[in-house]
Amino acid sequence: MTEDNVVNICLCPSCQSMTTMKQIVEDTFFCKLCKEQFKQFKNGKLIYVPLAVSETVEKFKKQLEEMQEDNDQTDLDFDIEFEPEFDPED
């Protein structure tokens, strides 16, 4: 089976319907049903984050990085995780 025959569907975080996401540009997509826009993240699985949330997180991350440049004593080495890892022992 070639990749041309594969249809990727997902649960839209906005309208909660099973749908396909249509690519707008590089990593920006929209739901074909509700037309909400999302940024796609690939971290072992595909995650669609509403575009407004994604832009706010990126802006905040940039501000923190600028603060770190201004104050060399602050250690802000971090990654942003939208979904925490599951620990079955908890």
Image: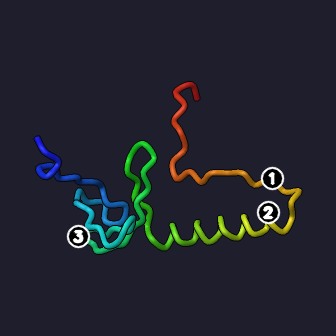
Colour scheme employed for the rendering of this structure = rainbow
**Disc with the residue nearer the chain's start (3 vs 2):** 3
- View extreme (top): residue: 89
- In which quadrant of the rendered view does residue 67 lie? bottom right
| Contact check, label 1 and label 2, Cβ < 8 Å | yes
Of residues 13 and 60, which is closer to you in this image? Answer: 60
**Depth check: 51 or 63 in front?**
63
Q: Please, what is the three-letter code of the amino acid marked with disc 1?
A: Asp
Q: Which amino acid does label 3 sit on?
A: Leu
Instruction: Look at the numbered disc 3 and give the secondary structure of its residue.
Output: loop
Q: Residue 74's spot in the image, x, y percent? A: 84, 57
User: Which residue occupies the foreground of this view, 66 or 18?
Assistant: 66
> Residue 45: where, in percent of width, then height?
39, 45
Q: Which quarter shows the C terminus?
A: top right
Does the residue at mark 3 contact the one at mark 2 (Cβ under 8 Å)? no
Q: Are marks 3 and 1 in contact (CB under 8 Å)?
A: no
**Does residue 37 appear left or right of residue 64 in this picture?**
left
Alpha carbon distance from label 3 to label 2: 42 Å
| Cα distance in 3D space between marks 3 and 1 | 43 Å
Q: How far apart are marks 1 and 2 (CA)?
A: 7 Å
Q: Which mark is residue 33?
A: 3
Residue labelled with disc 1? 75
Q: Residue at x 66, y 68 (%)?
A: 62
Residue closest to the eye, 57 or 26: 26
Other residues around mark 2 within 10 Å, as few (<14) / some (14–19) / many (≥20): some
Question: What residue lies at 31% left-to-right and 65% top-to-bottom?
Answer: 15
**Between marks 3 and 1 in the image, the one whose residue lies nearer the viewer:** 1
Disc nearer the start of the sequence (1/2): 2
Where does label 2 land, which residue?
Answer: 68
Q: Which amino acid does label 2 sit on?
A: Gln
